[in-house]
Image: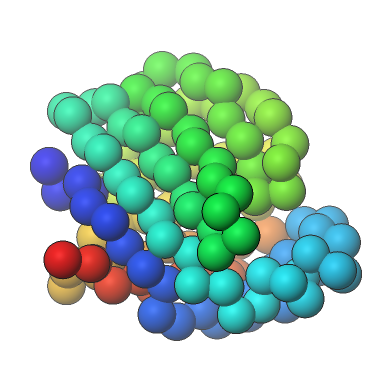
Amino acid sequence: MAFTGRYEVESEDNYDAFVKCIGIPSDIIEKGRNFKIVTEVAQNGNDFVWTQIYPTGQSMTNKFTIGKEADMETMGGKKFKATVKMEGGKVVVDFPNYHHTAEVAGGKLVEISTAGAITYKRVSKKLA
């Protein structure tokens, strides 16, 4: 499937401004600034398992089916319910305080999160 793969962050734009805006504590912002987060995506039709693995060994996994409500978790660890959509080949979800899209473009995972006027962009390269 289009999203299936293992990806490692290669660039980020507006990390500090975005995470401050969504209420991540300063000590966590500092620790996460240059993390090489690995994202693993397993897609089977409309079913997804989306895992982010941090260098500390911690991970966060969201399991969802396009168009169905699912239990999700934010990067700050807050649990919530959301319905993930597919729009023009992009996975789209509204987190409690930001809008998130993800797509595979040019073999890279491109994620964009918007909170108010701040847009955070993370591009991850596909690992072999």
Q: Position of residue 57 (x, y in %)?
A: 56, 54
Q: In terms of image quadrants, where is residue 66?
A: top left
85 in relation to 31, above or below = above
Quarter of the image that includes the C terminus: bottom left
Q: Position of residue 100 (x, y in %)?
A: 51, 52
Q: Position of residue 23 (x, y in %)?
A: 84, 57
Q: In terms of image quadrants, where is residue 106?
A: bottom left
72 vs 5, left or right, is right
Instruction: Specify whether residue 21 is in view.
Output: no
97 in relation to 117, above or below = above
64 vs 75, left or right, is left
Instruction: Specify whether residue 64 is in view.
Output: yes
65 in relation to 104, above or below = above
106 vs 68, left or right, is left
Name the foreground residue: 57 vs 11.
Answer: 57
Name the foreground residue: 54 vs 45.
Answer: 54
Name the foreground residue: 110 vs 55.
Answer: 55
* Residue at screen point 16% across, 28% down: 45
Q: In terms of image quadrants, where is residue 68?
A: top left
* Residue at screen point 65% across, 50% down: 75
